[in-house]
Image (cartoon, helix red, strand yellow):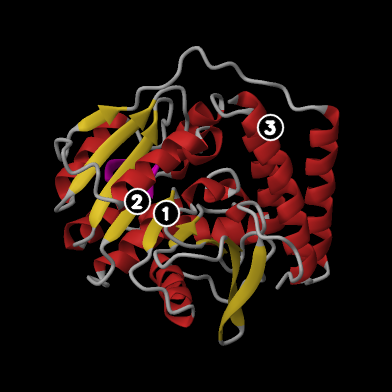
Amino acid sequence: MRIGRRSKSTDVTVTRVEDGDMYVRVNTVGTGGTRPFVLVPGIGVSSTYFEKLAPHLNEFGPVHALDLPGFGGVPHPDDTLSIRQYADLVGRVIDELELDDPIVVGHSMGSQVVSDLVSRRPEISTLVLIGPVVIPSERRVVKQAVRFLQSSWHEPFTVKVLAISAYLFCGFKWFSRVLPKMMSYPIEDALPNIQARTLVIRGEYDAVAPREWLKRIGQLLPTSHLWEIPGAAHSVMYAHAEEVAKLCLAHARDDLSFETENTLHIVKTDTEKEDVAPTIPEIAQAVHGRLVETTGILTDNDDLIAEGKTEAAEAVQAVSKNED
């Protein structure tokens, strides 16, 4: 854990929650408050996908972004983990950190993980699903690969770079072993058992989680609010972090209750907002942060991982402020 530094929304601390010979890496921003967020990424990728979103969520308490076994450089066990086993690991994090009714967020395969968990934990009252998968009638690798490529075309360059580096750390062997677990998991069976108030978010160009599938999810959930963000793709929480954060915080405050349930709403965005290219110092800081984080992963040094994540997050935050 990092010590002796002024706490900011981009400061990251790294801890581990162990379960036998496995552990979950917990990357945390913020320290105050009593209502934490728990963020679970998708297959192959890491908590870095939440680095733009997490600082915006630090309103009620700390934000914990997880790296599950096999992803983000966290070692995996010999046996392939199922969605249920990943869900149990997230539950262990909640229990070990003594988190009281956290706001649980899952993206892509992470939506399966948190749906499985929350369907068995009625004490969790608030859930967010981002780009949920997989459409039951399309549980074929080729079909999902096509949908993923269609969505990726609309992702910003930064997301593509993050994806490539994350998949390299994951490795083809582990990815190919977990993929069938994701493809076969029946999220449609878990959704009706979820008692939590649920917010479901998709990007306009998210071919992995198309509109009709989102509407079907809304019908399966006992309570739901469905939102689409214009201009976004599957990794909507990275490229459109502020819009996603506003929805998540409003959902946590129950400020979306006035909206019609199970109806798809479109977020109103600032069409006049222009993208601002990062400066050379910001690029250099981000690259250096990634290198420090990578060194920490390769040397199994959580302090270096925290240092690198913080440095990269500061650069990303600086770019975001320039765009406002």
With 295 as the anchor, is 122 left or right in this view? left
Residue 75 falls left or right of residue 295: left
Identity, as a three-letter code, of the amino acid under mark 1 = Gly
Which mark is first along the chain, 3 or 2? 2
Name the residue located 80 percent from the left edge and 27 percent from the top edge.
279
Magenta stretch in the rendered image: 128-138
Task: Please state the horizontal and vertical placement of residue 93, each as a whole percent of the image.
Answer: 48, 75
Q: Is residue 84 above or below residue 151?
A: below
Amino acid beneath label 3: Val
Q: Are marks 2 and 3 in contact (CB under 8 Å)?
A: no
Q: Residues within 10 Å of mark 2 (few under 14, many from 20)?
A: many
**Circle nearer the N terminus (2, 1):** 1
* Quarter of the N terminus within the rendering: bottom right
Question: Does 141 lie within the magenta span?
Answer: no
Q: Nearer the viewer, residue 58 or 184?
A: 58
Of helix, strand and loop, which one carries label 2? strand
Label 3: how many residues lie within 10 Å, few (<14), some (14-19) or many (20+)?
Answer: some
Q: Position of residue 210 (x, y in %)?
A: 34, 32
Q: Nearer the viewer, residue 94 or 85?
A: 94
**Of callouts 1 and 3, the N-terminal one:** 1
Q: Which residue is mark 3?
A: 319
**CA separation, marks 1 and 3?**
25 Å
Kindly tell me whether residue 190 is visible in this rendering. yes
Q: Quadrant of residue 115?
A: bottom left
Quickly name the residue at label 2. Answer: 128
